[in-house]
Every structure is written in C-alpha cells, then in structure tokens.
Image: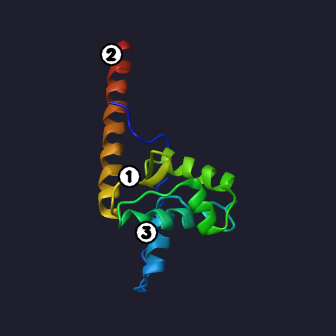
Amino acid sequence: MISTFKKITIIKIRKSPANNINQDIQNFSQSLGLFNVRDKEKSCYRIFVELLKAAKFEQGLSSDELAYKLNLSRGTVIHHLNRLMDSGLVVSKRNKYMLRTKDLASLIEKLKKDAIDFFNDLKNLALDIDKKI
C-alpha cells in the first residue's frame, strides 16, 4: 500500500493553558508544521483556517477564492496548497480545495492511518532487505 502523503512534519508542542480557540488552532497548525520561518505572513496557516471553516459546511474553495479572501497572490496560495496536499491535509476535487475530512479529529485519524501504513510498508521493505543480506 502506498501512503497518501509525501511529507508531513510533526512537532510536539505544549498546549497553552489559555482557553482560546485562535491559540488552539495555532497550536494545532504548528504541531503539523504549518508555520515556516520564511512564511512571515503565516499564509499557510491562514489558508488552512479558511479551509477549516469551509469544511464545516463540506465546501471547497478555489485558489482564486482563497487568494481574494486572504489578499494573497494566487502563486502563494498554490504553493501552500501543494504543500498541504503533500502532507495529506488537503485534497483537490473539481478545481476546489478542501480539508481531507470535515473535522480535525477525523483528519488526525486519517493521518494516523497513513503513518501506520507507511511504517508497515517500510517494515516490509526492511524484512525484504534483511532476507537478501
């Protein structure tokens, strides 16, 4: 089985004691590596939040809609959408981008399954190599 994602970054961070939805979403996003030192405007995070809002209504957004809503260039949006798709967080359907699932808990379960599948594939490869050595 081939994993759905190509690259995902997982960063263990401490949950902030404040009960603030914005901080919780930032912590969640940071844990998935959506912040990058080069991304000064937090464009990837902002795109993720818009997709998260749209997911509640099971809707997708085009790159043009995201660029307009967030006042970003379409090139910037496409760059971050590709990164989000590579990580397995976002999918594209009929020129619309959406979270892979309708909520964050389901998204984490999908990513967990992807990771388990990846490690099972890697273990099988290791067993094949061990037999040949």
Task: Report crowding for label 1: few under 14, some 14 to 19, many 20 or more residues within 10 A (C-alpha).
Answer: many
Residue 100, label in figure:
1
Q: Identify the image's colour scheme: rainbow, by chain, secondary structure or one colour.
A: rainbow
Q: Is residue 41 above or below residue 114?
A: below
Q: Quadrant of residue 129?
A: top left
- Nearest to the eye among marks 2 and 1: give it: 1
**Residue 33: percent from left, percent from top:** 52, 58
* Circle nearer the N terminus (1, 3): 3
Kindly give the residue lying farthest to the top in the view shown: 132
- Horizontal side, residue 102 vs residue 91: left or right: left
Specify the amino acid type for callout 1: Arg
Regarding residue 92, the answer to whether it shows in the image is yes
Residue 53, label in figure:
3
Q: Is residue 45 above or below residue 127?
A: below
**Residue plotted at (49% across, 67% down):** 49
**Residue 95: percent from left, percent from top:** 50, 46
Q: Real-space Cα distance between discs 2 and 1?
A: 38 Å
**Residue plotted at (32% across, 30% down):** 1
Q: Real-space Cα distance between discs 2 and 3?
A: 49 Å
Q: Real-space Cα distance between discs 1 and 3?
A: 13 Å
**Residue plotted at (44% across, 55% down):** 98
* Circle nearer the N terminus (2, 1): 1
Q: Secondary structure at mark 1?
A: loop
Residue 131, label in figure:
2
Q: Is residue 51 above or below residue 129?
A: below
**Total marks drawn?**
3
Asked whether 66 or 88 is in front, the reply is 66
- Horizontal side, residue 109 vs residue 12: left or right: left
Specify the amino acid type for callout 3: Lys
